Amino acid sequence: MAKFKIIISDPDLQNSKTVELEETRAVPLIGRRLGEILDGAVVGLSGHKVQITGGSDKDGFPMRPSVHGGVRRKVILRGGVGFNPKEKGERIRKTVRGNVITDEIVQINMKILEKPKKPKKEKKTKEKTVKKESESTA
């Protein structure tokens, strides 16, 4: 069965946390693609919206959005995920994983897009009694 290590990053607080999903909790993620927006309840963050941003397989090959399917492929890269060119125009053939989450994926990266809205507390205002001054008619 599938076992995933989920890294959820929060751009607002600039931190991340790790969640591990096994067996039946991991099933809703299988077949999802990079860039999909999910309900946070899948990873234990109810009320949140999270986006799948990346991941890697059991041998450490990164998932690349431009490679379709859930398979490993050797593709020519000129930059981006999986290759950082040192010279201008440099290209190289590298092995990367496709953009679909399968059983062979071990790590999945996500980021929080939307947090639940907290209900605003109503401010209790004290009603001031207005004293009516008696007008003198002299």
Image (cartoon, grey):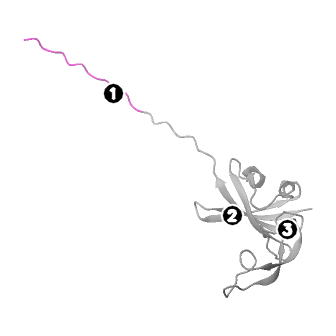
Check residue 128 in the rendering and tell me which mark sits there, or answer none: 1
Q: What is the tally of numbered marks visible in this picture?
A: 3
Looking at the rendered structure, the kind of residue marked 3 is Ile
**Residue 6: image location, x then y, percent:** 76, 63
Magenta part, dominant SS: loop
Tell me the crowding category of disc 3: few under 14, some 14 to 19, or many 20 or more residues within 10 angstroms, Cα based. Answer: many
Q: Is residue 61 left or right of residue 114?
A: right
Q: Secondary structure at mark 1?
A: loop
| Quarter in which the C terminus is drawn | top left
Give the numbered dot on residue 17. Answer: 2
Residue sitting at 75 percent across and 67 percent down?
54
Few, some or many residues within 10 Å of mark 2 (<14, 14–19, 20+):
few
In magenta stretch: residue 127: yes
| Mark whose residue sits in front, 2 or 3 | 3
Quarter of the image containing the N terminus?
bottom right
Q: Which residue is farthest left?
A: 138
- Tag 2–tag 3 contact (CB < 8 Å): no
> From the viewer's perspective, is residue 44 above or below residue 132?
below
